[in-house]
Amino acid sequence: MARGPVLVIGLDPLRIPGWDPEPVVAAIARGQARFDEYGIEADLCLVVPDESAEAAVVEALTGRAYACVVVGGGIRKHEPLLALFETVVNLVRRHAPGAAIAFNSSPEDTADAALRWLPGVGERGDR
């Protein structure tokens, strides 16, 4: 049974200078594959922490109705990105008020984060 859809908002590893993106790209691919295993549609919105991020998030949020939005740890955990994290959460509240908001701890457990909040799944999703 298909559930979702889910939007995953995170940092674009290919556009962040100064580090090797390949491990993160591979982890994102493994995380997306887990959504497929559960039969959950999941869209990615990968952003750069600059002035383009807000518009990219709004475009993704308004493109379709989402059951859940997962905000990635790259945005949430890196203290210099606190303002971006706050912006993302408030954009979700404004543009997808019916969507649950979830947080992953790594790209590979993104499906697990969404499953906690999707209807018919997990403790919170059953509420």
Image (cartoon, rainbow, N blue to C red):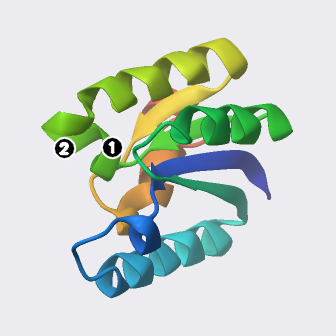
Q: Could you tell me which secondary element the residue under label 1 belongs to? A: helix
User: Which residue is depicted at the point 35% across and 86% down?
Assistant: 22
Q: Could you tell me which secondary element the residue under label 2 belongs to? A: loop
User: Which residue is depicted at the point 66% across and 47% down?
Assistant: 6
Side (left or right) of 73 relative to 42: left
Circle 2 residues within 10 Å: few <14, some 14–19, many ≥20: few
Q: Is residue 119 among what the camera can see? A: no
Side (left or right) of 42 relative to 93: right
Q: Is residue 99 among what the camera can see? A: yes
From the image, which quarter does the N terminus lie in? bottom right
Circle 1 residues within 10 Å: few <14, some 14–19, many ≥20: many
Side (left or right) of 122 relative to 20: right
Report the disc number at residue 75: 1
Q: Which of 33 and 21 is in front in this view?
A: 21
Q: Nearer the viewer, residue 104 or 117?
A: 104
Which residue type does callout 1 highlight?
Ile
Q: Nearer the viewer, residue 98 or 118?
A: 98
- Mark 2 touching mark 1, by CB under 8 A? yes
Which residue type does callout 2 highlight?
His
Q: Where is residue 103 in the image (x, y as percent from the top left)?
A: 37, 40
Q: Where is residue 17 in the image (x, y as percent from the top left)?
A: 30, 69
In the displayed structure, 125 sits above or below 35; it is above
Residue sitting at the far left: 79
Q: Which of 92 and 53 is in front in this view?
A: 53
Residue sitting at the far right: 64
Query: Residue 112 falls in which quadrant of the image?
Result: bottom left
Q: Position of residue 69 (x, y in %)?
A: 57, 38
Query: Residue 33 falls in which quadrant of the image?
Result: bottom right
User: Which residue is depicted at the point 28% across and 38% down?
Assistant: 76
User: Which residue is depicted at the point 26% across and 83% down?
Assistant: 20
Q: Name the residue under label 2.
A: 78
Residue at mark 2 to residue at mark 1: CA–CA distance: 6 Å
